Image (tube, helix red, strand yellow):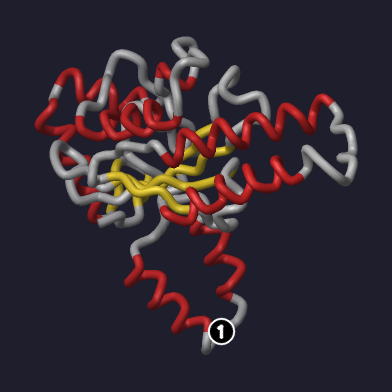
C-alpha cells in the first residue's frame, strides 16, 4: 500500500504545481467528476482495514484505481479454504453510485500450469483456456452462475457514506454466512434453508471440483 501513498503525494504535488505559472486547461464536467472519483477511491484504498482473508490487487497497475480485484479466502464456514476473486469497476460518480462487482473466480494455479504446458504442444487450446477461465462458476445462494452478486450494499442499501471497505466486508460475510432469503441461485438457497448439511456437502464438492446436478464446478481450493 506504500506505493498508493506515493501516488497520492504525486497527484497532490502536481495539483500544487499547477496553481501557479503555466495556465491549466479547463476541464469539462465529466473530467472533473472522474478526477474527484479517483481521489475518493484513493482515500478509500489507502485506508482499507481488511481481514487477513481478503487481498486487493491491481491488474492494470496501481495508476488505475477505478478497476481492481479482490480475492477472498474464507477461514471459516462452508467455504473455508476456497479462493474467490471479484472484479470491481468504480463509476466516475462514486460514491453516489456503488461500484460494479462481479465474481470471476479462476482455476487453481496447478491446473493453469498444466494447461500452459499443453499449450506447448497444441496452440489451439489457448483460445479455449481464456474463454474457460473467465466463466468459472461458484455454487452459492447469493451468487449466480454468471458471477452476479446479490449484496444489499451494492443495491438498495447503498449510500454515499459507505465505501469500498464496506463492500469487501459484505462479500466476505457472504461466504462465512450465506443467506437463503435473498437468493440468485434458488436451488442452493432452498437447500441451505431446508438441509444445511446437504448444502455443505454440495459446497465441498464444488470447491474440490465436481458436478452438482447438471453443472460442473471447477476446483477453487
Q: Nearer the viewer, residue 67 or 216?
A: 67
Residue 16's place in the image compared with 116, above or below, is above
- Count of marks overlaid on the render: 1
Residue carrying label 1: 122
Residue 23's place in the image compared with 126, above or below, is above
The image position of residue 136, as x and y in percent, is 44, 50
The residue under the point 70% across, 47% down is 14
The image position of residue 163, as x and y in percent, is 45, 25
Left or right position of 178 against 46: left
Q: Determine the secondary structure under disc 1.
A: loop
Residue 156's place in the image compared with 188, above or below, is above
Residue furthest to the bottom:
121
The image position of residue 133, as x and y in percent, is 49, 58
Q: Quadrant of residue 61?
A: bottom right
The image position of residue 179, as x and y in percent, is 27, 21
Please identify the quadrant where the C terminus is shown.
Answer: bottom left
Q: Nearer the viewer, residue 99 or 123?
A: 99
Residue 105's place in the image compared with 49, above or below, is below
Q: Quadrant of residue 200?
A: top left
The residue under the point 78% across, 38% down is 19
Category of crowding for the residue at label 1, using alpha-carbon neighbours closer than 10 angstroms: few (below 14), some (14–19), many (at least 20): few
The residue under the point 19% across, 18% down is 193
Q: Nearer the viewer, residue 47 or 138?
A: 47
Left or right position of 201 against 216: left
Amino acid at each position: 500500500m506504500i506505493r498508493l501513498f506515493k501516488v497520492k503525494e504525486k497527484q497532490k504535488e502536481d495539483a500544487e504545481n499547477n496553481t501557479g505559472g503555466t495556465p491549466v486547461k479547463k476541464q469539462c464536467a465529466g473530467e472533473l467528476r472522474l478526477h474527484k472519483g479517483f481521489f475518493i477511491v484513493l482515500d478509500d484504498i489507502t485506508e482499507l482495514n481488511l481481514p487477513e482473508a481478503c487481498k486487493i490487487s491491481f491488474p492494470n497497475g496501481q495508476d488505475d484505481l477505478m478497476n481492481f480485484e479482490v480475492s477472498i479466502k474464507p477461514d471459516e464456514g462452508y467455504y473455508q479454504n476456497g479462493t474467490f476473486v471479484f472484479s470491481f469497476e468504480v463509476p466516475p460518480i462514486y460514491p453516489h453510485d456503488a461500484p460494479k462487482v462481479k465474481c470471476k473466480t479462476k482455476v487453481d494455479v496447478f491446473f493453469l500450469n498444466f494447461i500452459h504446458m499443453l499449450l506447448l504442444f497444441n496452440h489451439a487450446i489457448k483460445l479455449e483456456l481464456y474463454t474457460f477461465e473467465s466463466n468459472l462458476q461458484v455454487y452459492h445462494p447469493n451468487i449466480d452462475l454468471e458471477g452476479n452478486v446479490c449484496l444489499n450494499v451494492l443495491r438498495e442499501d447503498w449510500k454515499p457514506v459507505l465505501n469500498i471497505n464496506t463492500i469487501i466486508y459484505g462479500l466476505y460475510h457472504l461466504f462465512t454466512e450465506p443467506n437463503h432469503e435473498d437468493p440468485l441461485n434458488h436451488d442452493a438457497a432452498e437447500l441451505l434453508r431446508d438441509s444445511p448439511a446437504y448444502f455443505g456437502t454440495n459446497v465441498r464438492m464444488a470447491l474440490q471440483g465436481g458436478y452438482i446436478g447438471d453443472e460442473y464446478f471447477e476446483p477453487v481450493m
